Image: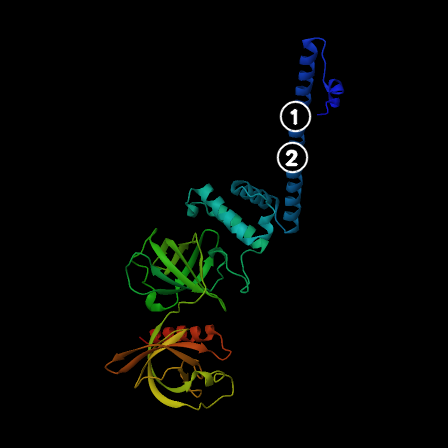
Amino acid sequence: MDQSFRTVTPYFRLRYDSPWEYELLTYFVIAVALTAAVSIAIASVVRRYRDRKRAKQSFRHISVERGLSESQCRQLEMISIEARIVDPLLLFSSLTTFDRSVAQYLKQQTNGHVAGNTKLVDRIYKIRQRLGFDQVPTSHLLPSTRELPLGQKLMVWPANGGRSGFCQCAVTHRDDQAITAVPVLREDEGFFATLGSGDLVKVRFWRDDDTEYRFRSRIIESVPETTGITIAHGDTLQRIQKRDFFRLEVQFDVVLYVVPSTKAEGVAKAGVTAVSGTPVAATVTDISGGGMSAIIDGPVPDDHVFVVDPKFEGAFPIAGINCVIIDQVSSPDGLQTRLEFRDLGGRSESDLVNAIYRHQIEHASRR
């Protein structure tokens, strides 16, 4: 084996004439390492300080651009600090971040008793208005109950029992503290008489051309004199992809045509006044934005559907709608049939839902 490389290895070995030279080199290496570590730490601190200073300058610059006063700017800074937001500038552009941060800040500052600090709530709500976060376009998802528009209809249930059914209310005021609503129907003015502060309620509502929203909350105050209620904002706003419509009990006659499912499409289009099918007399017993129940005389063949008479001129805009049979149950009056609407013919569900609500209000006013 070739051992010629051993003749040059001594030149690569450090030689010391005394031990202190070895110690001196060791101390030198340690000093260099410590100096490098301290330099890196100082550079990091300086960089963070500059980044924070730059971010603060940007924060104040954007505050001025958005029309916030000096006190509002400081308030928003406090919110970002308390909420520990990584990027405080998101408070100007992200409604979700703003809502989450405000909710956390109010909870920390008031120990959960927001009603006791109306001045703070008012300051924050004015900031919300200035930033344009008090309204959400219908084309956007609603991130929280803090953006409910005035006039929004709410369906409210007591969560722990009590009076049966729900109370249909309309939002009359909303800020970062709570929602104020009043019953739509006169007969419901005493609905919340037995409920007091802290009682839990379940709330459902729909926005135009949108799906259903639900949340649970508690009553902050119930005022029998004004029939109004104040509801705390819900911690979690649940969005339901498919609506669970309110079902109204009714009693009216209608003609349904039995047609093959392949020939039912397009009947509900404007201008269609006749259907080539077998007419069947039916009595509608309840109706919702998604379907209805009716009593008919006999069964319907498989792969057939019902089409509402295109000439129907009743209280509800269902003329020409295709109806798929969900199930049929025998009753003394005939077959109780549940039907689901499949073709609204270009009409929105909200038209039918609004007609149902109007019918409920008119019926209640005649009592």
Pick the front one: 351 or 326:
326
Q: Which residue lies furthest to the left in this view?
A: 332
Q: In the image, is 253 to the left or to the right of 64?
A: left
Q: In the image, is 131 to the left or to the right of 252?
A: right
- Counting from the top left corner in percent of width and height, residue 162 is at 28, 59
Q: Contact, CB < 8 Å: mark 2 with mark 1? A: no
Q: Give the amino acid type for the residue marked by disc 1 in the picture.
A: Val
Q: Residue at x 40, y 72 (%)?
A: 357
Spatial CA span between label 2 and label 1: 16 Å
Q: Give the amino acid type for the residue marked by disc 2 in the picture.
A: Tyr
- Counting from the top left corner in percent of width and height, residue 178 is at 44, 53
Tag 2: Cα neighbours inside 10 Å, few (<14), some, or many (≥20)?
A: few
Q: Which structural element holds mark 2?
A: helix
Q: Which mark is residue 38?
A: 1
Check the picture and name the quadrant holding the C terminus: bottom left
- Counting from the top left corner in percent of width and height, residue 6 is at 73, 20
Q: Which mark is residue 102?
A: none
- Residue that numbered label 2 is attached to: 49
Pick the front one: 103 or 190:
103
Instruction: Tell me, yes or no, if residue 237 can be seen here.
Output: yes
Instruction: Tell me, yes or no, if residue 119 can be seen here.
Output: no
Residue 13: quadrant of the picture: top right
**Residue 122 in the image: above or below residue 239:** above
Q: Residue furthest front?
A: 1
Q: Which structural element holds mark 1?
A: helix
- Counting from the top left corner in percent of width and height, residue 273 is at 47, 90
**Residue 170 in the image: above or below residue 146:** below
Pick the front one: 281 or 96:
281
Q: Nearer the viewer, mark 2 or mark 1?
A: 1
Question: Sequence order check: which comes first, mark 2 or mark 1?
Answer: 1
